[in-house]
Each structure stands twice: as C-alpha cells, then as structure tokens.
Amino acid sequence: MTWTDAVVALLLLVGILGIVVPILPGTVLIGSTLLVWAILTGGAAWWWFAAVVVVLLIGTVVQYAVPGKRLKAAGIPTRTLLVGGVLGVVGFFVVPVVGLVIGFVLGVYLAETSRVGREEAWPSTVHALKAVGLSMAIEATAAVVASSIWVVAAFRL
C-alpha cells in the first residue's frame, strides 16, 4: 500500500462518516477523491472510476426517489420537509451537529402542527424521520459499494 492509497482510504472513510454524521457531503467527497485517484493512477483506473460514478449516481437517484414516494404515500407535503430542512440548517449553527437533527424534527413537527393539528403532527414527523433515515441508509450503502469498488481496484492495479 502506497501513501496515496492510504490517503484515499482515509478520505473514503471520512466520506462514509460524513453521510452518517452529516457534516461533510459524503458522496461528493468519495466521488472527488476517486476522481483524483483515477487522474493520478491513469489507465484502467478510469474504468473503475466509471463504475464508482454509476454506483453513486444510482444511489443518489434512489436516495431521493424511494423516501419521496413513501412521504407522498403518507401525505406529507414537500413544504413540510423544506421547513424541517431550514430549521435543521439553523439548528446546525446554533447547536453544532446535533442541532441539525433537532432543528429538522422541530421544523417538521411545527409545519405539520400548523397543517394537520397537534394530534396528527407527531405521526407525520415520525414518517419524515423514517424517510430521512432510509435516505441516509441508501446513500451510505452506495458509498460503501463505491469504496469497495476502489478497494478491489487498488488490489488489482
């Protein structure tokens, strides 16, 4: 293992952790890292990089499509998620890292309270949280598969 491989492995790990703990854009970090790796390695590395791009693109599409479909089925409007997202970003700066989750939950709950009332707001909030969790799981799975492709490529090249 070269020092380049060690740096790439570390950045891939940081990218995966950035998905689970939303501090860094994990998918972008993984894709960028492997782009630089392909540039530095050259040759067949580009085919491996192409496979990584396909996996990350599929993961990104599925990450939004599947939870979005479930939220529509549960009757939760996009506006509710936008309010949750805005309060999540505000919460991130007020209480670093943990504030993102707290702000999102509070934003969704408040938006749903104004839309459907207090009794129905909490079940809607739970649906939204499950959708976010599913989205993160899908993105993390794509990131692990993409990183695994690099591991195979690193041993083969």
Image: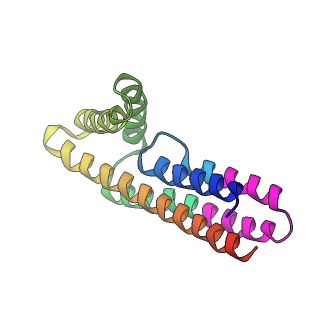
| Magenta region includes residue 42 | yes
Q: Nearer the viewer, residue 147 or 53?
A: 147
Q: Is 119 drawn above or below residue 1 in the view shown? A: above
Residue 151 figure quarter: bottom right
Q: List x then y, in percent, for residue 127.
A: 28, 53
- Residue 105 vs residue 22: left or right? left
Quarter of the picture holding the C terminus: bottom right
User: Please, is residue 117 above or below residue 65 in the view?
Assistant: above
Residue 110 lies, with reference to residue 36, above or below; the image says: above
Judge whether residue 125 is colored magenta: no
Residue, x 68% and y 74% (percent of image)? Answer: 155
Position of residue 89 measured from the top left corner of the image (x, y, whole percent): 43, 30
Prevalent SS, magenta region: helix
Range drawn in magenta? 31-58
Question: What residue do we see at 36% from left, 39% from top?
Answer: 80
State whether residue 43 is above or below residue 77. below
